[in-house]
Image (cartoon, helix red, strand yellow):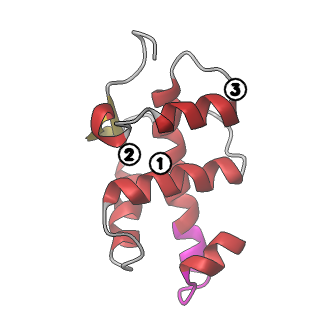
Amino acid sequence: MSNKDKVTIGLTQGGKACLDRILKLGWFNHDMDLAKFAMAFAIARKVIPGEAKGAATVWNVGSLDSDGSVSTIIQELCGERESPYKLAEHLIDEGLKLIVEQINARPEISLEELLAT
């Protein structure tokens, strides 16, 4: 992680609303687990790298990525990055929105079915 990278991971207002909606489904016990799933979901769907502009702090990097696995996944799957946590923040935010799009399209969708989309 460079000195220019984030020390906190946040969500946009839209991303936070999506997080809250998904958590109510009971698929995840902790918001950090959902955040990591959303990041992986976004990577699998080839979300274009960007920034989550206007994101408000939700997690400290040390809590979200205590073992460095999030940074490692970003580096391995998205290429070497000077700011992996900035990209992780974007991917989490976008992944949450993509998940809610699937829920809106099929309100009865299960987590297993979501993975197959």
CA–CA distance in space, label 2 to label 1? 7 Å
Q: Given the image, on which type of amino acid does mark 3 rest? A: Gly
Contact flag, marks 2 and 1 (Cβ < 8 Å): yes
* Quarter of the image where one finds residue 19: bottom left
Residue at the (31%, 62%) spot, across then down:
30
Query: Is residue 84 at all visible to an observer of this figure?
Result: yes
The residue positioned 39% from the left and 9% from the top of the image is 3
User: Magenta part of the protein: which range?
Assistant: 100-110
User: Residue furthest toward the top?
Assistant: 3
The residue sitting at 28% across, 39% down in the picture is: 63
Residue found farthest to the front: 67
Q: Residue furthest bottom?
A: 108
Q: Is residue 80 above or below residue 41?
A: above
User: Relative to 113, does residue 61 appear above or below in the rendering?
Assistant: above
Q: Amino acid at mark 1?
A: Asp
Q: Relative to 76, does residue 6 appear above or below in the rendering?
A: above
Which mark is drawn over residue 12? 2
Q: Secondary structure at mark 1?
A: helix
**Residue 71 included in the magenta stretch of the image:** no
Q: Position of residue 105 (x, y in %)?
A: 62, 80
Which residue is denoted by mark 1 in the rendering? 93
Q: Tag on residue 79?
A: 3
Callout 2 environment at 10 Å: few (<14), some (14 to 19), or many (20+)? some
- Of labels 2 and 1, the one closer to you: 1
Which element type, helix, strand or loop, lies under badge 2?
Answer: loop
Residue 89 x %, y %:
45, 38
Looking at the picture, which amino acid does disc 2 mark?
Thr
Q: Is residue 117 left or right of residue 21?
A: right
Q: Quadrant of the C terminus?
A: bottom right
First in sequence: mark 2 or mark 1?
A: 2
Q: Residues within 10 Å of mark 3 (few under 14, many from 20)?
A: few
The residue closer to the viewer here, 65 or 12, is 65
